[in-house]
Amino acid sequence: MHIGHNITKVRELKGITQCYVAKMLNVSQQAYSKLEKQEYIDNDKLREIANILDCSINVIKNYSEEKILQFLNRDHQQNNNS
């Protein structure tokens, strides 16, 4: 499991930029970019990032393309049925 990679994928799926997350964390974009390259991130920092991305830590830790696609398809179907 590579937490930084998972954060990148979730962030990109949500259409959120590195600059935005960096600003919310009060760090430079370069410093945040380094975070996304780390295999492990401490839980306190991960919690901050998850809050910014409006998801749970478990979504990031257990990220898989298949799970995200299932979630997006389910969300899309619910919106179409409304």
Image (cartoon, grey):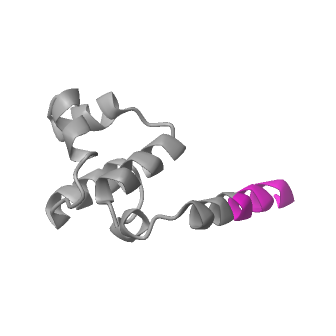
Residue projecting furthest to the right: 81
The image quadrant of residue 74 is bottom right
Q: Where does residue 78 sit, x and y in percent of width and height? A: 76, 62
**Is residue 24 shown to the viewer in this render?**
no
**Is residue 70 shown to the viewer in this render?**
yes
Quadrant location of the N terminus in the rendered image: bottom left
- 37 up-or-down from 82: above or below: above
Q: Where does residue 62 sit, x and y in percent of width and height? A: 42, 70
Decide whether residue 70 is among the magenta residues: no
In front of the other: 35 or 47: 35
- For the point 45% across and 51% down, the residue is 10
Tell me: 1 left or right of 25: right
Q: Where does residue 6 sit, x and y in percent of width and height? A: 39, 56
Q: Where does residue 52 sit, x and y in percent of width and height? A: 33, 48
- For the point 18% across and 56% down, the residue is 45
The image quadrant of residue 34 is top left
In front of the other: 13 or 80: 13
Please tell me how many numbered marks the rendered image carries: 0
- 15 up-or-down from 45: above or below: above
Tell me: 68 left or right of 20: right
Quadrant location of the C terminus in the rendered image: bottom right
Decide whether residue 76 is among the magenta residues: yes
Q: Is the stretch drawn in magenta largely helix, strand or loop?
A: helix
The part of the chain drawn in magenta is: 73-82
